[in-house]
Image (tube, rainbow, N blue to C red):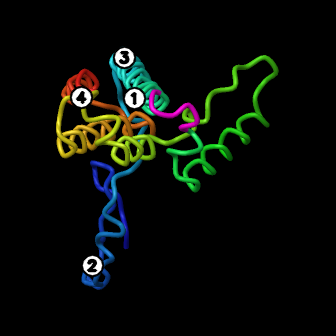
């Protein structure tokens, strides 16, 4: 009733079940194969994303700290701060002795970091970025898309690498 064709895609072989609503989309999925990737491109892309994301965190720390030395407690919403601190504590429980303990901002996910920037845009970040809030949101969306491909072990193309390079230069 269901068979794989020469390309590895499943197909419905019987007319009776081919007409069942929704069934075709459920079985018409390619077979999983180990993704192909260019090692040096992926290495460079991971490094770029890592550096850009952590430069963004540093910018947040510097800009919020310049206005309030207790910025972590006063400028980060309690629920976000709590999640980051819980992630930090979980990390502490599994760290090998002698490994560095990071600041809780390292445990904010990328969306949470950009949310902080947008929440404090007028007071702390507009001059640092030299663009509108709307332009930064678009830049963030483009960076997140490529960064998420890397974070979830999906390869990127040369074009996607160039996009990552362009967005990280603007961040």
Q: Is residue 138 magenta?
A: no
Verify CB contact (< 8 Å) between mark 2 and mark 3: no
Q: Earlier in the sequence, mark 4 or mark 2?
A: 2
Instruction: Say whether residue 143 is left or right of residue 34.
Output: left
Within 10 Å of disc 2 (Cα), the crowding (few <14, some 14-19, many 20+) is some
**Front position among marks 2 and 1:** 1
Does the magenta-highlighted stretch encompass residue 69?
yes
Please give the range of residues in magenta.
66-71
Expressed as whole percent of the image width and height from the top left, the position of residue 74 reads 55, 45
Residue 40 falls left or right of residue 6? right
* Residue at 61% from the left image edge and 50% from the top image edge: 83
- What is the C-alpha distance between the residues marked 1 and 4? 12 Å
Say few, some or many: other residues with alpha carbon within 10 Å of mark 3 (under 14 / 14 to 19 / 20 or more): few
Towards the viewer: 38 or 138: 138
Q: Position of residue 79 (x, y in %)?
A: 57, 56
**Can you identify the residue that label 1 sits on?**
56
Location of the C terminus (image quadrant):
top left
Image location (x, y in percent) of residue 34: 43, 36
Q: CA distance from mark 4 to mark 3?
A: 14 Å
State the mark number for residue 167.
4
> Which sits in the foreground, 129 or 69?
69
Mark 2 or 1, nearer chain start = 2
Mark found first going from the N terminus, 3 or 1: 3
User: Looking at the image, do the residues carrying marks 1 and 4 touch, with CB atoms under 8 Å apart?
Assistant: no
User: Where is mark 2, residue-wise?
Assistant: 18
- Of the numbered discs 2 and 3, the one sitting upstream in the chain is 2
Q: Tell us which disc is closer to us: 2 or 3.
A: 3
**Helix, strand or loop at mark 2:** helix
Q: Residue at x 79, y 37 (%)?
A: 93
């Amino acid at each position: 009733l269901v068979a794989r064709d020469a390309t590895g895609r499943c197909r419905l072989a019987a007319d009776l079940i081919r007409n069942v609503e929704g069934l075709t989309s459920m079985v018409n999925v390619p077979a999983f194969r180990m993704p192909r990737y260019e090692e040096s491109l992926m290495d460079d892309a991971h490094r770029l994303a890592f550096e850009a994301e952590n430069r963004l965190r540093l910018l947040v720390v510097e800009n919020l700290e310049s206005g309030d030395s207790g910025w972590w407690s006063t400028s980060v919403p309690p629920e976000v701060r709590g999640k980051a601190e819980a992630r930090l504590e979980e990390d502490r429980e599994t760290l090998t002795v002698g490994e560095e303990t990071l600041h809780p901002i390292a445990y904010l996910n990328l969306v949470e970091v950009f949310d902080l920037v947008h929440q404090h845009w007028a007071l702390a970040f507009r001059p640092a970025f030299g663009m509108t809030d709307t332009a930064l949101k678009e830049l963030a969306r483009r960076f997140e898309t490529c960064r998420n491909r890397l974070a979830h072990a999906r390869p990127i193309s040369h074009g996607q690498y160039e996009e990552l390079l362009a967005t990280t230069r603007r961040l």
